[in-house]
Image: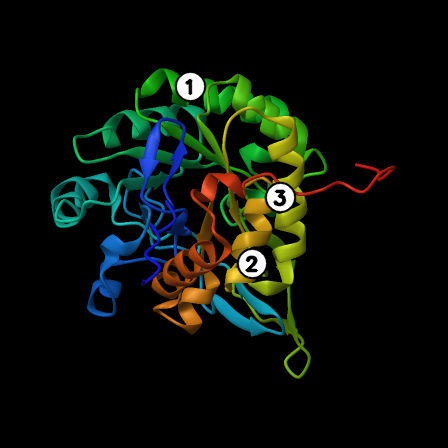
């Protein structure tokens, strides 16, 4: 008799929002153009490129450079503004069933709160607050660098919207757990851990920085150990869900983050190298869970075994 087994349930819950699977894009690496490459509804959620209230041109060129193990970018959040999002982007995304997560950023607490209120529209499932982008604040400073500024902006955001609110944290802080706890206490429903690591590269022939903004955000496989460590720390310290982000490109990466405590993951730089990588990861995760006899992917989350006597 043929052995007929039920497929593993890949569904996860992130702060009250149910996702069909834990794979989603990282903000800034995902656009409508990918709909020509694969069915976007295979993803657990759609996370849009960060928008700001007004139109913004972004940083001076060059904005991107390739590095061993990843890439460095100083895009600077170019944005077409809230009107373009409301009138063009939101109606376009309504064709899909996957939850729509809107990433927002602003220069001030007041502007952040105003934008959160304005994007709280029918069709938006959650807001990701990009309080960590290293290209906006002077010398890489951002709200998420310190617990006090994190708490201040997240409290204002929480008061401005009833939608699920995700806080995107930064690896450029010496207080990752304290910042995560501040976001949680201020009303965040989930944490995205983490954004890019601030870095720099120099063209030795020209003796000039390879980015027009001098410094930029490092992404790709080289930052995975940092993001994985932060995910483990934050998941262990906080009660709210953690979404892992940083250098994820393979099934091995996805499983490492989930075992460390992430309930979902975001894929970024890998999409630039292989536009169908997220669809492949969903299929590979399904195949792995089925082969392992996992009834629900929830069984994998946070199952890391800490060696006896190990430090933090």
Name of the residue lying farthest toward the right: 309
* Residue nearest the observer in this picture, 312 or 173: 312
Tell me what residue is drawn at x 46 percent, y 66 percent: 270
Left or right, residue 120 beside residue 190: left
Displayed quadrant of residue 301? top right
Residue at 12% in and 43% down: 87
State the residue position of label 1.
Answer: 156
Picture layout, residue 100 above or below residue 182: below
In this view, 135 is above or below 312: below
Instruction: Choose top left, top right, bottom left or bottom right for residue 129.
Output: top left
The span from disc 1 to disc 2 (Cα, nearest Å) is 34 Å
User: Of the numbered discs in the image, which one, if any, rests on residue 260?
Assistant: 3
Q: Residues within 10 Å of mark 3 (few under 14, many from 20)?
A: many
Mark closest to the chain's N terminus, 1 or 2: 1
Residue 70 appears left or right of 310:
left
Is residue 215 positioned above or below 116 on the image? below
Q: Estimate the spatial distance between the alpha carbons at disc 3 and disc 2, rounded to whole Å.
A: 11 Å
Q: Earlier in the sequence, mark 3 or mark 2?
A: 2
- Give 139 or 284, whichever is nearer the viewer: 284
Tell me if mark 2 has few (under 14), some (14-19) or many (20+) residues whose alpha carbon lies within 10 angstroms of its own. Answer: some
The spot of residue 200 in percent (x, y) is: 64, 62
* Residue position for label 2: 253
Identify the secondary structure beneath mark 3. Answer: helix
Mark positioned earlier in the residue sequence (1 or 3): 1
């Amino acid at each position: 008799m043929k052995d007929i087994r039920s497929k593993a349930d890949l569904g996860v819950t992130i702060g009250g929002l149910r996702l069909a699977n834990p794979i989603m894009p990282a903000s800034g690496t995902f656009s409508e153009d990918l709909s020509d490459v694969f069915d976007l509804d295979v993803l657990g959620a759609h996370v849009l490129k960060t928008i700001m209230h007004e139109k913004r041109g972004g940083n001076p060129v060059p904005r991107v450079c390739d590095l061993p193990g990843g890439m460095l970018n100083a895009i600077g959040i170019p944005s077409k503004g809230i009107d373009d999002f409301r009138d063009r982007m939101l109606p376009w995304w309504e064709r899909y069933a996957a939850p729509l997560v809107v990433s927002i950023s602003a220069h001030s607490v007041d502007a952040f709160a105003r934008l959160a209120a304005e994007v709280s529209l029918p069709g938006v499932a959650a807001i990701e607050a990009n309080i960590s982008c290293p290209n906006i604040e002077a010398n890489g400073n951002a709200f998420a660098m310190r617990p006090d500024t994190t708490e201040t902006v997240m409290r204002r955001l929480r008061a401005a919207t009833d939608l699920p609110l995700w806080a995107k944290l930064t690896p450029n802080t010496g207080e990752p757990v304290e910042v995560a706890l501040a976001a949680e206490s201020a009303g965040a429903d989930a944490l995205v851990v983490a954004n890019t690591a601030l870095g720099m590269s120099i063209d030795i022939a020209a003796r000039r920085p390879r980015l027009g903004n001098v410094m930029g955000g490092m992404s790709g496989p080289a930052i995975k150990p940092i993001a994985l460590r932060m995910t483990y720390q934050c998941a262990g310290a906080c009660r709210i869900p953690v979404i892992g982000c940083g250098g994820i490109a393979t099934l091995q990466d996805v499983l490492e983050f989930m075992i460390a405590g992430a309930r979902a993951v975001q894929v970024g730089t890998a999409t630039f190298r292989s536009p169908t990588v997220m669809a492949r990861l969903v299929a590979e995760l399904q195949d792995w869970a089925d082969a392992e006899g996992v009834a629900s992917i929830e069984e994998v989350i946070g199952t890391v075994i800490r060696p006896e006597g190990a430090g933090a």
